[in-house]
């Protein structure tokens, strides 16, 4: 018979521990995507409000990029709103630094916290994710108002975000009243 013993070797290092600053890189990428999303839709809104009678024509690549970002951020909005924190998505090193740092070190830890995709602990928020959820809600609300005020000047591709966001709001309101009882 073969002896089947379990090795007590330490677990393999995670990818995050092998790449310095990976959570910050992810956070910066998320901020970039959010700002791109906001910038594109701000441009669309200005053009729609400036249009006289017909919808403005937008570059297909810009519309496609905006729609892709809206889809991803909209999905994140739908998934993140109302969910609870998970211990597996926290940054323990950041939490340790925030707890022991003071003065200039605490200020640097706060910058790290603002850039880190992973929250410092389950009771803390991820600042990039929080920014993304709030930015999506603000931009999508602005697009919805733009559509309501300018239905004839709003291209179909831009109306899609307004309608999708309206669906998320209806689902959120329904869930809020369903769980209140």
Image (cartoon, helix red, strand yellow):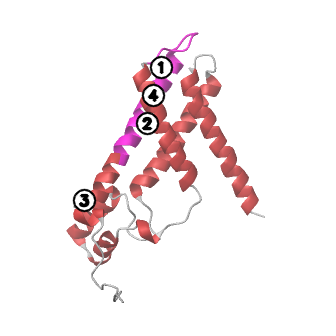
Q: Is residue 119 above or below residue 35?
A: below
Q: Is residue 42 visible?
A: no
Q: Which residue in the structure is indicated by mark 3?
A: 21
- Indicate left or right for 147 with 128 as reference: right
Who comes first in sequence, dot 3 or dot 2?
A: 3
Q: Where residue 89 sits: x, y (%)? A: 42, 65
Secondary-structure class at tag 4: helix
Q: Quadrant of residue 179?
A: bottom right
How much space separates mark 1 and mark 3, taking CA atoms? 39 Å
Please tell me how crowded label 2 is: few (under 14), some (14-19), or many (20+) other residues with Cα within 10 Å.
many
- Indicate left or right for 25 with 165 as reference: left
Who comes first in sequence, dot 1 or dot 4?
A: 1
On residue 38, which mark appears?
Answer: 2
**Magenta region:** 30-58
Closer to us: 79 or 101: 79
Q: Is residue 44 above or below residue 125?
A: above
Number of the front mark, 4 or 2:
4
Who comes first in sequence, dot 1 or dot 3?
A: 3
Query: Residue at position x 54%, y 49% from top?
Result: 77
Secondary-structure class at tag 1: helix
How much space separates mark 3 and mark 2, taking CA atoms? 26 Å
- Residue closest to the far top: 53
Our reading of the magenta stretch's main secondary structure is: helix
- Indicate left or right for 51 with 1 as reference: right
Number of the front mark, 3 or 2:
3
């Amino acid at each position: 018979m073969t002896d089947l013993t379990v090795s007590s070797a330490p677990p393999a290092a995670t990818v995050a521990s092998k790449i310095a600053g990976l959570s910050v890189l992810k956070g910066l990428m998320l901020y970039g995507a959010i700002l791109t999303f906001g910038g594109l839709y701000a441009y669309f809104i200005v053009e729609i409000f400036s249009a006289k009678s017909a919808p403005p024509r937008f570059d297909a690549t810009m519309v496609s990029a905006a729609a892709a970002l809206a889809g991803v951020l909209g999905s994140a909005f739908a998934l993140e709103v109302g969910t609870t924190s998970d211990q597996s998505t926290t940054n323990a090193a950041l939490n340790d630094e925030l707890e022991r740092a003071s003065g200039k070190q605490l200020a640097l830890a706060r910058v790290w916290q603002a850039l880190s995709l992973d929250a410092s602990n389950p009771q803390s928020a991820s600042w990039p994710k929080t920014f993304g959820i709030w930015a999506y809600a603000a931009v999508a609300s602005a697009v919805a108002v733009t559509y309501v005020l300018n239905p004839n000047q709003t291209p179909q591709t831009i109306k899609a975000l307004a309608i999708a966001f309206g669906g998320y709001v209806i689902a959120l309101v329904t869930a809020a009243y369903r769980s209140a009882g």
